[in-house]
Image: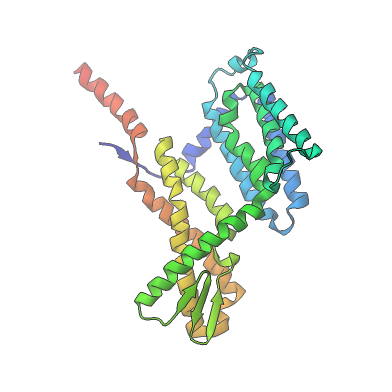
């Protein structure tokens, strides 16, 4: 029988810092410089949203630490890379330079602002591949992409995600309230009550809490699973959890508006509901983790038992 996920944070996750020993100092320096450069950019450019960007940077750093477990245990292997093993690094470097200079000439150009950071991503991955081999490209792709692509375009990505989150939450909340006999309708992200209209804005979509939820969810999932497959599937459940909990928050706001009027939109109530959303999504994600079998953990526990049976 498979064992099921159990919370082992923080001890299991803190033990992952031992994987940093597998990093050659050159690759460790590259990753550290990426994090420091991103931190400087956040503090100088991010403005009032620096705290949200800082949480994403913390997620990238956590991903880097956890990704080191995919490096070879003997880091001297990375010190003896041949020129053939470093060809992917040179290929990425040439591709980054080609895209960059073509964009300057205007021949091809980069039509979308988000893709303008793509040469930087290739350049950073080339540095990782030069000191960590071709495997470092996929090992550190996600944390490097967060630093090079996601963080510079965080507001653009947030706007793109916000509308579907608002729309789905609005539909669910209104449809459920209609089942209980409330007289209200909706159109897209606007809710209509007799004599009143409520617009569900970006602040009501759960997008303001997304960075914190991504970070807490990652720590939670990695502390509950040793299987990559189940941890990934479990992590994906965060999206429907956010939608459902946010729909509940909108429904509560509507009920408060019916009984309290405009006072339901006070900053204190809005802030408390935001904290409640983070707590509820985290608890829901933790609770659903028990339904995911961790076959890796089960195999490790069965091996000693099989050996005892063989000796008998």
Residue occupying image coordinates x 42% and y 46%? 234
The quarter of the rendered structure image containing the C terminus is top left
Answer left or right for 16 relative to 111.
left
Reply above or below: 57 against 210.
above
Residue 294: quadrant of the picture: top left
Residue 278 visible, this angle = yes
Answer left or right for 165 relative to 294.
right
Q: Which is more toward the observer, 61 or 89?
A: 89
Residue at the outermost left position: 312
Residue at the outermost front position: 107
Q: Position of residue 201 (x, y in %)?
A: 59, 68
Q: Position of residue 153 (x, y in %)?
A: 67, 49
Residue occupying image coordinates x 72% and y 59%? 48
Q: Position of residue 44 (x, y in %)?
A: 78, 50
Colour scheme in use:
rainbow
Residue occupying image coordinates x 56% and y 30%? 138
Residue 229: quadrant of the picture: top left
Residue 8 visible, this angle = no
Residue 180: quadrant of the picture: bottom left
Q: Which is more toward the observer, 308 or 227?
A: 227
Answer left or right for 118 relative to 62.
right
Q: Which is more toward the observer, 308 or 269?
A: 269
Residue occupying image coordinates x 47% and y 41%? 222
């Amino acid at each position: 029988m498979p064992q099921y996920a159990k919370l082992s944070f923080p001890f299991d996750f803190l033990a992952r810092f031992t994987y940093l020993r597998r990093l050659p100092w050159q690759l460790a320096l590259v990753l550290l410089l990426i994090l420091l450069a991103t931190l400087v950019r956040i503090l100088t450019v991010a403005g009032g949203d620096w705290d949200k960007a800082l949480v994403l940077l913390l997620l990238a750093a956590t991903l880097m630490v956890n990704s080191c477990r995919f490096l070879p245990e003997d880091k001297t292997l990375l010190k003896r890379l041949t020129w053939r093993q470093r060809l992917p690094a040179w290929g990425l470097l040439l591709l980054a330079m080609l895209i960059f200079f073509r964009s300057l000439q205007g021949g091809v150009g980069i039509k979308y602002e988000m893709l303008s950071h793509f040469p930087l991503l290739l350049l950073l991955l080339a540095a990782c591949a030069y000191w960590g081999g071709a495997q470092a490209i996929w090992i550190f792709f996600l944390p490097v992409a967060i630093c090079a692509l996601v963080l510079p375009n965080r507001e653009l990505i947030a706007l793109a995600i916000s509308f579907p989150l608002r729309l789905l939450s609005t539909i669910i909340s209104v449809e459920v309230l209609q089942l209980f006999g409330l007289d209200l309708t909706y159109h897209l992200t606007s809710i209509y009550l007799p004599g009143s209209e409520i617009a569900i804005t970006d602040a009501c979509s759960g997008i303001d809490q997304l960075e914190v939820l991504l970070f807490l969810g990652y720590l939670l999932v990695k502390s509950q699973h040793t299987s990559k497959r189940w941890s990934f599937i479990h992590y994906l459940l965060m999206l429907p959890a956010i939608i459902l909990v946010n729909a509940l928050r909108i429904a509560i706001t509507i009920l408060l508006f019916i009984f309290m009027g405009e006072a339901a939109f006070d900053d204190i109530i809005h802030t408390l509901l935001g904290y409640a959303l983070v707590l509820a999504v985290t608890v829901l994600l933790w609770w659903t983790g028990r339904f995911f079998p961790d076959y890796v953990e089960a195999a490790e526990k069965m091996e000693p038992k099989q050996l005892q049976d063989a000796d008998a």
